Amino acid sequence: MDTSGYRDLADRLKAYGLSIVAKGAQLSVRNPLGANPVEGIAGQEGRYVSASGYELGERGDENSTALHIAFLLGASPVGAV
């Protein structure tokens, strides 16, 4: 499995102030300002999907995927007003 997309996505999510934990072939993402929600992210057929099967974005478009996930978790870029 090519993990470069996951690393890129994790780096972009960290820029939104989100906490990332890699669990095998899945990322666990949460907003540290709240206990919930936690979003599990895995790759499936060229897409990033949540643990419940919700499509979050495309592999290769980690920037838009990170923005989408950050929005869902109520995060904004670090340093944003």
Image (cartoon, rainbow, N blue to C red):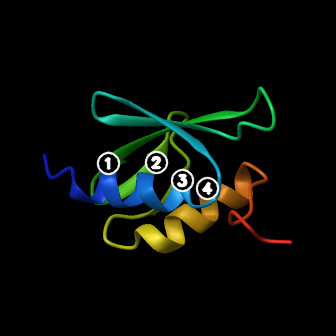
Q: Residue at x 51, y 54 (%)?
A: 55
Does label 1 or label 4 sit earlier along the sequence? 1
Q: What x and y, as percent, mark residue 30?
A: 64, 37
Q: Secondary structure at mark 2?
A: strand
Residue indicated by mark 4: 69
Q: Position of residue 77 (x, y in %)?
A: 69, 66
**For marks 1 and 3 on the same chain, the one whose residue lies earlier in the sequence:** 3
Label 3 secondary element: helix
Mark 2 sits on what residue? Answer: 49
**Mark 2 vs mark 3: in front:** 3
Identity of the amino acid at label 2? Val
Mark in front: 1 vs 4: 4
Q: Are marks 2 and 1 in contact (CB under 8 Å)?
A: yes
Q: Find disc 3 in the rendering and name its residue.
A: 14
Foreground disc of the pair 4, 3: 3
Q: Position of residue 58 (x, y in %)?
A: 39, 66
Estimate the spatial distance between the alpha carbons at disc 2 and disc 1, rounded to whole Å.
Answer: 7 Å
